[in-house]
Image (cartoon, rainbow, N blue to C red):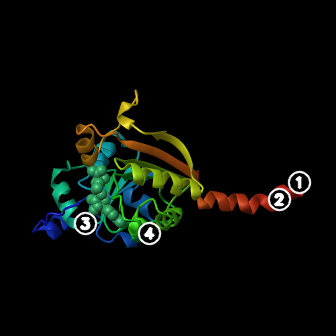
Amino acid sequence: MRLRNVKNKKEILESCPYVIMNPISYFGKWQDVFQNENPIYIEIGMGKGKFLVENAISNPNINFIGIEKYDSVLARGIPKIPEGISNLKIIRMDALEIDQVFSHEISRIYLNFSDPWPKVRHHSRRLSSTIFLKKYDCIFKDCCEIYMRTDNQDFYIYSLESFTKYGYFLDEISFDLHACFDFSSPTTEYEDKFSAQGMPIYFVIAKKKSVQNSKDEENNLPFTKSLV
Ligand SMILES: C[S@@+](CC[C@H](N)C(=O)[O-])C[C@H]1O[C@@H](n2cnc3c(N)ncnc32)[C@H](O)[C@@H]1O
């Protein structure tokens, strides 16, 4: 992706009430940030934030956090966000640091049109690679849910394999999301661009038990065995 520099990007981010400047200090305390117990969904690689903002407005009982690596990208999207959305926060960071920011607090991750990193030597940078799935284990709460959309077939197939090898089951898949008769979700900037060109949008919902839930079950195992 070509990044256009925004001169006053630092000031735009610092003056935006949605942007959390020191996210590590809220580790384990994100429900306090929102002052409610509603589930927290995050979008990694939010870009300019269309999908995130539309979802936050139409789902007031869910807290949304957008994560974006580049402040220039955020600085171009932030001025367009309406004021007063109480269930929306934004963090500028690399997703590689995600396990230092959240501790078993997240109920869903959206990966929308993540960078496909086509070269094999770069596959570990893909947000659906094992390196990231291990990090997501540290942030998911009761159940792990990853919702992914992409235009890139190779990256999609790689992700389906990566999810299943890591213990996720594929709850829903579509090779042409917009052709689904009941499709009615907000779309992303990239999604609008690709679908306007007639390209199919690949979609998957991958789910598994959270590490915490699995530990609870392991702890119960000796008791269960002694009954047999
Ligand atoms: C292709 S764009 C898609 C933007 C948006 N989700 C959409 O669909 O319109 C991918 C975005 O992910 C961001 N990104 C890539 N790697 C990231 C990482 N490791 N951590 C956070 N953001 C990342 C990029 O800066 C870019 O804004």
Instruction: Give the alpha-carbon distance from disc 3 to disc 2, as whole Å.
Output: 50 Å
Q: Is mark 3 within 8 Å of ligand 1?
A: yes
Which quadrant of the picture is home to ligand 1?
bottom left
Which residue lies under the disc numbered 1?
227
The crowd level at tag 3 (other Cα within 10 Å; few <14, some 14-19, many 20+) is some
Is residue 143 in view from this perspective? no
Which residue lies under the disc numbered 2?
223
Disc 2 vs disc 1: Cβ atoms closer than 8 Å? yes
The percent coordinates of residue 186 (x first, y second) are: 31, 40
Residue 27: assigned label? 4
Element type where label 4 sits in the image = loop
User: In the image, what residue type sits under mark 4?
Assistant: Phe
User: In the image, what residue type sits under mark 1?
Assistant: Leu
The crowd level at tag 2 (other Cα within 10 Å; few <14, some 14-19, many 20+) is few
* Mark closer to the chain start, 4 or 3: 4
Q: Extreme left residue here? A: 7
The percent coordinates of residue 167 (x first, y second) are: 60, 56
